[in-house]
Image (spheres, rainbow, N blue to C red):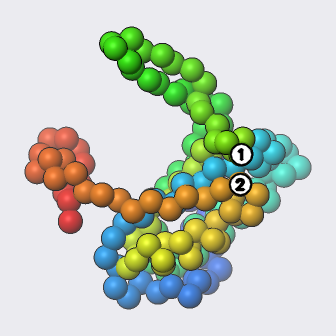
């Protein structure tokens, strides 16, 4: 019964105050969710409400013309990898100091960090977990090498 965050884009319920006027930069909205929120994904009594809230949020982003992508992240199949002195250390995915884990992300294209933050305030995970907004920083080498499969830098 797992659905992606982007499954219900056609159910757009109107946009927030930000319009697609002068988009200038991409931002990622990283959503860190509580264990209870992550458990709601597969709980028959709570899954529809959980996924519905994210579909509604994605629909607002899409209706405003700012959504560029995103995905739910696995709540169980994640690992943290560190390589020090040539030796790799692999362990279960890290939790934040507040005990939340990365649950998903949206990529948006808006005019400013302030606009991105306003959108992030509407993410369902902001009410119980933590939402982080990060501007994208182009890597000039990736944009210059089409064989890397990355979009060109702005």
Badge 1 marks a residue whose secondary structure is: loop
Instruction: From the viewer's side, name the closer residue of 100 and 59.
Output: 100
* Residue at position x 52%, y 27% in the image: 80
Q: Position of residue 69 (x, y in %)?
A: 45, 59
Q: Is residue 1 left or right of residue 23?
A: right
Rendered residue at 72%/41% (across/down)? 99
Residue 95 seen in the figure = yes
Q: In this view, does 42 lie above or below 55?
A: above
Q: Which residue is outermost to the right?
A: 45
Q: Position of residue 117 (x, y in %)?
A: 53, 72
Q: Which of marks 1 and 2 is nearer the N terminus?
A: 1
One can see residue 68 in this view: no
Q: How crowded is mark 2: few (under 14 residues within 10 Å), some or many (20 or more)?
A: many
| Horizontal arrangement in the rendering, residue 13 relative to residue 47 (left or right) | left
Measuring 58% from the left and 68% from the top, which residue is drawn there? Answer: 120
Residue 30 spot, x, y in % from top left: 54, 54
Q: Is residue 126 left or right of residue 46?
A: left
Q: Is residue 25 above or below residue 40?
A: below
Quadrant where the C terminus is found in the figure = bottom left
Q: Mark 2 points at which residue?
A: 129
Per the image, label 2 sits on a secondary structure element best described as loop
Evaluate if marks 1 and 2 touch, with contact meaning CB atoms under 8 Å apart: yes
Judged by depth in the image, the label closer to the viewer, 1 or 2, is: 1
Q: Is residue 128 above or below residue 24?
A: above
Q: How crowded is mark 1: few (under 14 residues within 10 Å), some or many (20 or more)?
A: few
Image disc number at residue 150: none
Residue 98 is tagged as 1
Question: How far apart in space, not on screen, are marks 1 and 2 (Cα)?
Answer: 8 Å
């Amino acid at each position: 019964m797992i659905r992606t965050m982007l499954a219900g884009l056609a159910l757009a319920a109107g946009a927030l105050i930000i319009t697609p006027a002068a988009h200038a930069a991409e931002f990622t909205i990283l959503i860190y969710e509580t264990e209870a929120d992550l458990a709601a994904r597969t709980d028959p009594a709570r899954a529809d409400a959980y996924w519905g809230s994210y579909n509604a949020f994605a629909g607002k982003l899409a209706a405003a013309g700012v959504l560029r992508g995103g995905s739910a992240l696995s709540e169980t199949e994640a690992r943290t990898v560190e390589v020090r002195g040539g030796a790799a250390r692999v362990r279960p995915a890290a939790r934040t100091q507040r005990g939340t884990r990365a649950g998903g992300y949206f990529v948006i294209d808006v005019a400013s960090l302030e606009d991105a933050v306003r959108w992030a305030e509407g993410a369902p995970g902001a009410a119980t977990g933590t939402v982080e907004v990060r501007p994208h920083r182009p890597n000039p080498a990736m944009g210059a090498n089409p064989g890397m499969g990355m979009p060109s830098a702005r």
